[in-house]
Image (spheres, coloured by chain):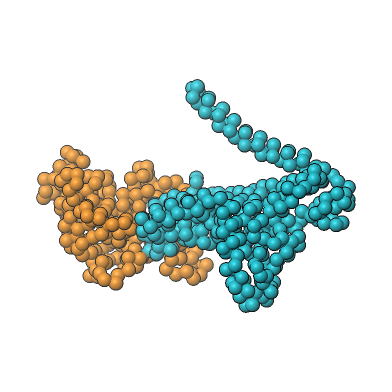
Chain colours: A orange, B cyan
Amino acid sequence: MAKRIDVKDLNIYYSDFLAVADVSVDIEPNSVTAFIGPSGCGKSTFLRTLNRMHEVIPGARVEGKVAMDGVDLYGEGVDPVAVRRSIGMVFQRPNPFPTMSIAENVLAGVRLNNRRISKGDAQDLVESSLRGSNLWNEVKDRLTRPGSSLSGGQQQRLCIARAIAVRPQVLLMDEPCSALDPISTLAIEDLISELKDNYTIVIVTHNMQQAARVSDRTAFFNIAGSGLPGRLIEVDATSTMFSSPREKATEDYISGRFG
Amino acid sequence: MEGFAGRAFRWTATGAGALILAVLAAVAVFLIIRAWPAMSARSGELSEKINWFPEGQSLLQFIGPLVWGTLLAAAIALIISMPLSVGIALFISHYAPRRLANTLGYVIDLLAAIPSVVYGLWGGLWLIPKLQPAWAWLADNFGWFPPFAGPASDPPRVILSVSLVLAVMILPIITAVCREVFLQAPVLHEEAALALGATRWEMVRMAVLPFGRPGIISAAMLGLGRALGETMAVLMILSPGALYSLALLKVGQQQTIAANIALQFPEADPLGVSTLIATGLALFVITLVVNMAARAIVARRKDFSGAN
């Protein structure tokens, strides 16, 4: 199910402003790739181009190539809606739909694809998705309660359940733990390690320990100054990046000398 | 510990809240006191002393058809204007390019500020003649449906024409409120829907409309309030009657409370005024009940509003 993503010479714009320049990176299937870097370096912007969420912002556009298993996601006739159905996303702040119950939240994406899902199938899917996000035991007795009644960490796992319920090939996570306490963060990190058996995972994080703990490969983004575009400095196996990076900037950032 | 500013604010806020309740109570007391002569009149006295009061009817029998006409006109106006308003508001908030949206929003705000008598004039002088063919067509093709039973009156000074003008009149205010509500829909949830592979319309259905539901209901109540109390537009268009009638295309069927008060007031003697005030009391009760019902609807799904 998991697929690979190959990015080649990608430039990302907000109207005329070049926000991220010249990114080429290969994201391996069934692995966790972490994007690290200082604030404003464009790692979240880059993440959002991988499922075409970037272009939701008026004036935002890209040049270059993003291919999933060889298929260009920005090719002619490719529907961004279809791209987003196969590449799921988890946001920085937990965002379950407040007007839906826990179960309805899990089914939200499925109902878009397949409106006539039978009641039994729906129940099974709710359970398997919530088990998949390690939330089932905490919420199984209150599936009809609003999603907003859960704690922040539980809400984030609900969002993960919602994302995996549509069985995407890739899961993008934009600082999924930055609004959570350490215990909830640990729960999500454990979950990420389990999810990579079935999905390709890309995670943006400000927390370098987190990148070191959960990821197989790490990409370091940096920005030379305000007004200048962010760039991908280097990408390598996480162990290499944290022990002997090739670039001086990477070493400075990882050892805490700036950022 | 509360500073002077804190105390001052608390008392001002409490005072303002109490003042609203006091005004409401004062209105209710005024209506009841002034309506009392009519309400306590012995049977037959009203039709004896008031020349326009229907022969042999009690006060309640008199008010009943007026309440019916008022509710009918306002309800149809709301049915016509709600889908349109929500549609226009959604177009402005989520579909139109920014410049067009700004212009449209400005026009809507302007329309909302036009006095109702102008709508009445426009409806009575310009719109009415043009409606006759449409209503005749309705009667010919949908006459089997009782409200549209023909023949359609000419000139069409009928309740459906009134409701149409009322709908145009309340459309801007409902649209303006809905637009504000839709603009407040959290980007967080809109992006959640889009990231799940929702189209724009599915995103609106998933994240915007459910979030805006209490606001839509409030907007509807605001519009309904204006439609229920509208006087001039009704007075200038409708050829009134006093029946519990569903016929929308015939003259001399219904009348609304507000228009009736304006029509009879100038020539009413003291008991006549008291009778009219009794109908005003009925209108007051209707608005209270309608608003309380709307509150109840909004409160029913409070846990799911996202406010917690």
Give percent across and percent down for residue B104.
43, 56
In the picture provided, is B143 more to the left or to the right than B110? Answer: right
Give percent across and percent down for residue A59.
28, 57
Which residue is located at x 64 percent, y 77 percent? B140
Quadrant of res B153: bottom right
Quadrant of res B36: top right
> A25 or A153: nearer the eye?
A25
> B112 or A166: nearer the eye?
B112
Give percent across and percent down for residue A87.
32, 63
In the picture provided, is B277 more to the left or to the right than B17? Answer: right
Q: Is residue A121 in view from this perspective?
A: yes
Total numbered badges shown on the rendered structure: 0
Give percent across and percent down for residue A259.
21, 41
> A252 or B47: nearer the eye?
B47
The single residue placed furthest to the bottom in the displayed view is B141
Q: Is residue A102 in view from this perspective?
A: no
**On screen, residue A134 above or below A83:** above
**On screen, residue B216 above or below A66:** above
Which residue is located at x 15 percent, y 53 percent? A234
